[in-house]
Image: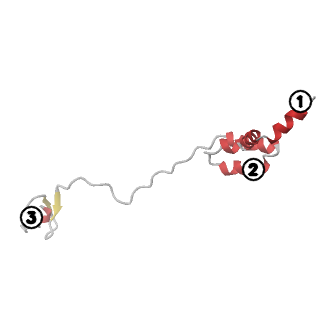
Amino acid sequence: MMTFHVWFFPFFHFHPFFMLVSLFLYFLPAFLARNKSNFTAVLLVDLFLGWTFIGWIVALIMALSSDPPRQIAAPMPSAAPPPQPAATTFFCTACGKPCVVNARFCSSCGAALPATQR
């Protein structure tokens, strides 16, 4: 009669399903840390030290620890000045005095104003 030990352990050690479950459990810390900033560190600790139980526990703790909050840099002020409201006056090109928009002649010197500023 075959004992439980002889029948169970060869099946348990070499069955493909057991191998897949074992690999998943071995790399469980890396799987849990896949979206974290310390993924590479967890993967390396798990890969090289995971075969020791303490190394696997360290990798699991690293994977389950929370990420520090990311600091978002304040937006830099733009080099361009903010837009100014539409001007109601402009300066005469002849005398430099302010003139009303849409005027044909300067009110100070009487010079004809360019059509582009009307």
Q: Is residue 116 rendered to the left or right of residue 39?
A: left
Q: Residue at x 70, y 50 (%)?
A: 41
* Badge 3 amino acid: Cys
Q: Residue at x 76, y 39 (%)?
A: 18
Label 1: how many Cα within 10 Å (few below 14, some 14–19, many 20+) = few
Q: Nearer the viewer, residue 117 or 52?
A: 52
* Badge 1 amino acid: Phe
Q: Nearer the viewer, residue 109 or 62?
A: 62
Query: How far apart are the two marked residues, 2 and 3, measured between alpha carbons?
Result: 83 Å
Q: Is residue 69 rendered to the left or right of residue 84?
A: right
Q: Nearer the viewer, residue 92 or 49?
A: 49
Residue of label 3: 106
Residue of label 1: 4
Residue 28 spot, x, y in % from top left: 70, 41
Q: Residue at x 55, y 47 (%)?
A: 71
Q: Quadrant of residue 17?
A: top right
Residue of label 2: 47
